[in-house]
């Protein structure tokens, strides 16, 4: 991702993929935001996945991860990467590798330069950008928990990682539960930073979008 030319190529590739999928080309800042979201989600799981599954925290230098502008696929050079000690996973009693602050520090070290590079292209300031990073860390752990049939554990891990007051991450995971007419619980949260998906599909923004009311969330969750 070195150099403005490489960054612009990644954004152009994202614009092409959005146009192919939705039949219209997005604004430049929307394409940049969508690729940044893709990057933060993927990289977030690169750090939180080992922590969640094995209590280990990798350190991934920025130059070890490359992206293909044409496909958006990432390639990781994992040779000689350092990884924190084994622990018991989130909330466990093992050594330093399972402490939430170790994860936050490793993520911030990696994504800080990425957010700085993308800032002018997505036309947002540092707080909004770090809000996106916060959202994708929380959502990634939530997704991982659901995929393993342990949604509550994924939510607990995200809450432990992002309790609020942990700069540069500007807010908490802040999960809450909505209940349908039959009493069915539906965990949810509201994003801190907008991913601009609504600019591509204005009739159906993402389910955690600040623009979506709890009533609309419940209708969509009950429908699914």
Image (cartoon, rainbow, N blue to C red):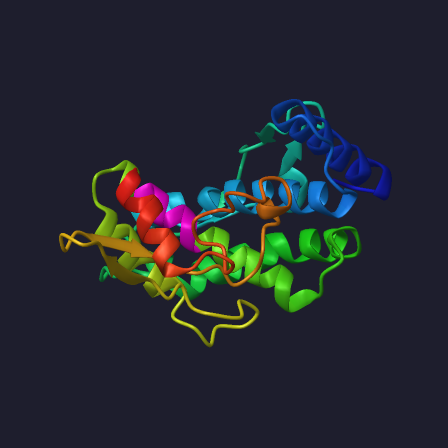
Looking at the picture, does residue 198 appear above or below residue 69?
below
Instruction: Residue 14: give x, y in percent of width and height.
Output: 69, 33
> At which x and y percent is residue 224?
30, 37
Rendered view: 46 above or below 84: above
What residue lies at 63% left-to-right and 60% top-to-bottom? Answer: 129
Residue extent of the magenta highlight:
138-145
- For image coordinates 55% across by 56% down, the residue present is 133
| Quadrant assignment, res 19 | top right
Q: Nearer the viewer, residue 12 or 93?
A: 12
Q: Nearer the viewer, residue 11 or 49?
A: 11
Q: Seen from this angle, which residue lies furthest left?
A: 182
Q: Is residue 13 left or right of residue 47?
A: right
Residue 215 as seen in the image, left or right of residue 118: left
Q: Give the number of marks.
A: 0
Residue 124 image position (x, y, % from top left): 72, 61
Which residue is at a point 70% across and 55% down the rendered structure image?
A: 113
Left or right: 26 with respect to 216?
right
List x then y, in percent, for residue 22: 62, 28
Which sits in the foreground, 180 or 109?
180
Give me the residue at 58% from left, 47% from top.
Answer: 198
Q: Is residue 164 visible?
A: yes
Image quarter of the N terminus? top right
Q: Look at the image and say whether residue 201 sits in the magenta stretch.
A: no
What is the residue that sits farthest to the bottom in this orientation?
A: 165
Residue 88: in sight, yes or no? no
Majority SS type along the magenta span: helix
């Amino acid at each position: 991702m070195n150099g403005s030319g490489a960054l612009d190529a990644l954004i152009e590739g994202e614009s092409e993929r959005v146009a192919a999928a939705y039949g219209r080309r997005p604004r430049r800042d929307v394409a940049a935001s969508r690729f940044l979201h893709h990057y933060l989600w993927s990289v977030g799981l690169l750090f939180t996945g080992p922590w969640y599954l094995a209590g280990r925290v990798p350190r991934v230098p920025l130059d070890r991860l490359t992206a293909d502008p044409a496909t958006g696929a990432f390639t990781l050079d994992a040779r000689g990467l350092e990884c924190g000690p084994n622990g018991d996973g989130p909330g466990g009693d093992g050594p330093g590798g399972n402490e939430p602050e170790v994860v936050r520090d490793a993520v911030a070290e990696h994504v800080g330069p990425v957010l700085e590079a993308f800032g002018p292209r997505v036309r947002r300031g540092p707080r909004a950008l770090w809000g996106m990073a916060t959202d994708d860390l929380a959502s990634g752990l939530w997704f991982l928990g659901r995929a393993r049939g342990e949604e509550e554990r994924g939510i607990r891990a995200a809450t432990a990682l992002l309790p609020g007051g942990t700069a540069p991450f500007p807010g908490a995971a802040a999960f809450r539960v909505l209940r349908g007419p039959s009493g069915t619980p539906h965990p949810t949260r509201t994003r801190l930073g907008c991913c601009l998906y609504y600019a591509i599909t204005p009739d159906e923004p993402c389910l955690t979008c600040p623009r979506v009311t709890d009533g609309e969330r419940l209708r969509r969750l009950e429908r699914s």
